[in-house]
Image (tube, rainbow, N blue to C red):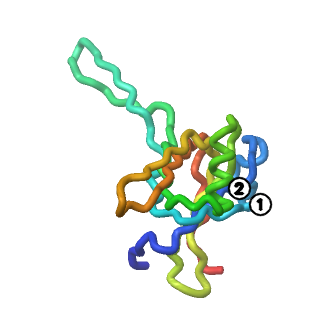
Amino acid sequence: MAVVTASGTIVEIGPQVVPSVADTLVEFQALSGWTPIGEVESVGEFGDQANDVTFSAVGDARVRHIKGARDAGVMALVCGHDPQDTGQAALELAEQTKFQFAFRVTLPDSPGAPFTNTIYYFRALVGSRRKNIGNNDNVIRNTYNVLLVSEVFTAPSVSA
């Protein structure tokens, strides 16, 4: 398959969840109540990265690198401000809580029938909701920092 652009990517916020309810791909796929987030301009990077743990032995004066705890990151979700969008309203409400929510990101990478799109699932906190008003010729934007707290589960593009 050839590479594709991000045009057509869908980001959704799901229900409030706890690890025992959404901790496997099958459990995420069984969830209902997904709300599309409208006017998304940019979906920031996300995915596991291991912490770099170092150790220096005096005998050879070499630094050793060891993989430590894994961090799925903070996804910066930039949206054009739409006070009537139910997805943005859900993000606004989620930011005011300390609870985890399910998220689903669907890529537009199917090469066509009978293939599916790749879908990513994860649990996250909405850590911030910042507004960028800018100047006369700017679109008012909201940036939501989505703090991933779980592994990112992938349902790859497959033949349906």
Q: Would you say the residues marked 2 and 1 are in contact, meaning their CB atoms lie under 8 Å apart?
A: yes
Instruction: Give the residue displayed 65% in from the left and 59% down from the top.
Output: 87
Which of 7 and 116 lies nearest the eye of the viewer? 7
State the image quarter where residue 125 is shown: top right
Q: Residue furthest bottom?
A: 113
Q: Measured from the top left, where is residue 136 in percent x and y?
A: 36, 60
User: Residue beneath label 1, please?
Assistant: 33
**2 over 121 or under it: above or below:** below
Mark positioned earlier in the residue sequence (2 or 1):
2
Q: Measured from the top left, where is residue 31 in percent x and y?
A: 77, 58
Q: Is residue 138 visible?
A: yes
Instruction: Give the residue displayed 43% in from the left and 79% down from the top.
Output: 1
**23 over 54 or under it: above or below:** below
Q: Measured from the top left, where is residue 105 in percent x and y?
A: 58, 61
Q: Quadrant of the C terminus?
A: bottom right
Left/right placement of residue 56 relative to residue 147 reads: left
User: Residue beneath label 2, please?
Assistant: 14
Which of 133 and 110 lies nearest the eye of the viewer? 133
Measured in 3D between alpha carbons, the distance from the residue under mark 2 to the one under mark 1, in whole angstroms, is 6 Å
Which of 46 and 7 lies nearest the eye of the viewer? 7
Q: Residue furthest top?
A: 58
Circle 1: residue type: Gly
Circle 2: residue type: Gly
Instruction: Give the residue displayed 39% in from the left and 27% down from the top.
Output: 53
